[in-house]
Amino acid sequence: MHAVEYFELLGGGKKDGGFHGSGMSNARLAILPGVTHYTILQSPLLNIIVTGFLDQPSQRRQR
């Protein structure tokens, strides 16, 4: 399945997140420039993006 289709199935991209992010869904899609699925684990951006995602409070994780 295409990544964007999967993102949409999880509720991403269905509505505007709003100025303050209050309308954002729990789904996230990260696109890292200049990497492939072979080299993504060596990218310093991966750690930054994953850590930022995990540090954010999530409604789904709080239930």
Image: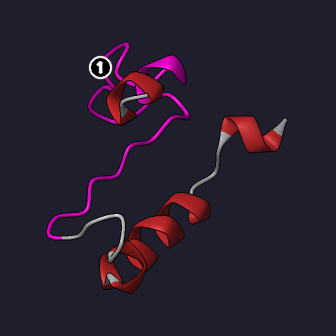
Type of amino acid at the residue the image marks with label 1: Asp
- 17, above or below 54, in the image: above
- At 38% across and 43% down in the image, what residue appears? 29
- At 27% across and 53% down in the image, what residue appears? 31
Of helix, strand and loop, which mostly describes the magenta segment? loop
Q: Using the image as rendered, state which of residue 34 and residue 8 is in the foreground.
A: 34
The stretch drawn in magenta includes residue 19: yes
Quadrant location of residue 3? top left
How crowded pointer 1 is (Cα within 10 Å; few <14, some 14-19, many 20+) is rated as few
- At 27% across and 66% down in the image, what residue appears? 36
Question: Percent x, y for residue 44?
Answer: 33, 85
- At 51% across and 35% down in the image, what residue appears? 27
Quadrant location of residue 40? bottom left
- 28, above or below 14, in the image: below
Q: Is residue 47 left or right of residue 19?
A: right
- 40, above or below 59, in the image: below
Q: Using the image as rendered, state which of residue 23 and residue 28 is in the foreground.
A: 28
The extreme right residue here reads: 63
**What range of the chain is rendered magenta?**
7-34
Q: Using the image as rendered, state which of residue 24 and residue 13 is in the foreground.
A: 13
Q: Is residue 24 at least partly visible in the picture?
A: no
* Circle 1 residue: 16
Q: Is residue 39 at least partly visible in the picture?
A: yes
